[in-house]
Image: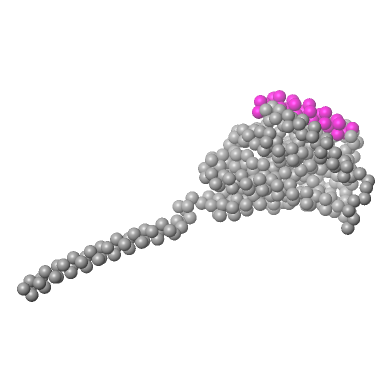
Amino acid sequence: MKRSGKSLERPRAKALKRREFLTTAVTATAVTAVAASSFPKPSLSQGLKKWRMQTTWPKNFPGLGTGANKLGEFITKASDGRLTVEVYGAKEIVPAFETMDAVSSGTLEMGHGAPYYWKGKVPASQFIASIPFGLNVGEQNSWLQFGGGQELADKVYRKLGCKFFASGNTGVQMGGWFNKDINTLEDYKGLKMRIPGLGGEVVKAAGGIVVNLPGGEIPPALASGAIDATEWVGPYNDLAFGLYKSAKKYYYPGWHEPATLLDNFINLEAWEGLSGDLKAIVQTANAYANSYVLNEYIANNNAALETLVKKHGVQVKKFPDEVLIGLGALSGQVIGDLASKDALSSEVLKSIVKFRTGSIAFAKVSEQAFYNARVLPFDWVSL
């Protein structure tokens, strides 16, 4: 009986040990699976994106270049690195004015410039940038958000294979740097001037010779006499470029660009490949950059103008009313003629004209009236 008992216990013990081993193995496998699922996957499987953005501006240039840097930084940080944007200055990858081609083709994912640079590709783009005697910066941003401007801009940029975002604004620019006085409209005849967009078309109509140059090429062109005059942006940027070294007459106001919009354009396929949350981050980043750039100009223009006048002997001169009236009349003719040749340009212009008309009526009793009141001769706060 004992022998038979021992012989029965041994198989039973082996079976128990086997069940224990299998139970332990199954449990270990389950634990391993849970642990694996709780650790981050390798970066490649997470779908991280790395985009390149080239600007049409010199690398890190005040206002223009720094705004583009802020845009890239915001997207990278807000996405926690899921969408990293590396920023390059003009010519670091392609020439400045070839940036749009590079983005449209997919060589680059993003670009940063100004819409009138692309008028040779889609004429309607120049109407989005800024219109002579047109919308100021507040009106322009309002038109984009509430006047159908964003939808029209997207329609224009789809023809370029891109998604459009407003990504900065200079506000009212200066009228330009000249080596001679501008007393009448006749003084524009034969003048070789660097001036882009619709403003350039108006100067051309006034008899000027318009030269298109990217920002980095302006200072040497003015210094060498290749151009007689130039506009760039305003005191903050113009001081940084040293334009006062080659011209001393600094005219205002910037009738040609009362609010110059900067564009962030994104390859359409790349944009559509983003998840919903990444699209929201890019949109928010551009809204931030749009505000940041304008605020940077407001904060720095006055001090820069004082430096130009007091340190460098620049003469700040106002265009005579006669000249402004003549330029205004020419602007209406030129803008209307250009828009009539292109259906999309006409659609954009009609929308802007309607918004401008409504804005002017209220501005007379609001901002315009306030500005006039603020400079009346009375003592204010003295510190």
Query: In the image, residue 222 lies at what x, y percent?
Result: 80, 45
Extreme residue toward the front, this view: 1
The answer to whether residue 323 is magenta is: yes
Q: Is residue 328 magenta?
A: yes
Region of the chain picked out in magenta, as a range: 322-344
The residue under the point 79% across, 52% down is 300
User: Which quadrant is the N terminus positioned in?
Assistant: bottom left
Q: Percent from the top left, x then y, of residue 372?
A: 87, 41
Which SS type dominates the magenta stretch? helix
- Quadrant for the C terminus in the image: bottom right
Residue at 85% across, 46% down: 247
Q: Residue furthest left?
A: 1
Count all numbered tags in the image, as a single digit.
0
Hey, which quadrant is residue 253 in on the image? top right
Q: Nearer the viewer, residue 233 or 166?
A: 166
Q: In the rendered image of this protein, does residue 194 appear above or below residue 76?
A: above
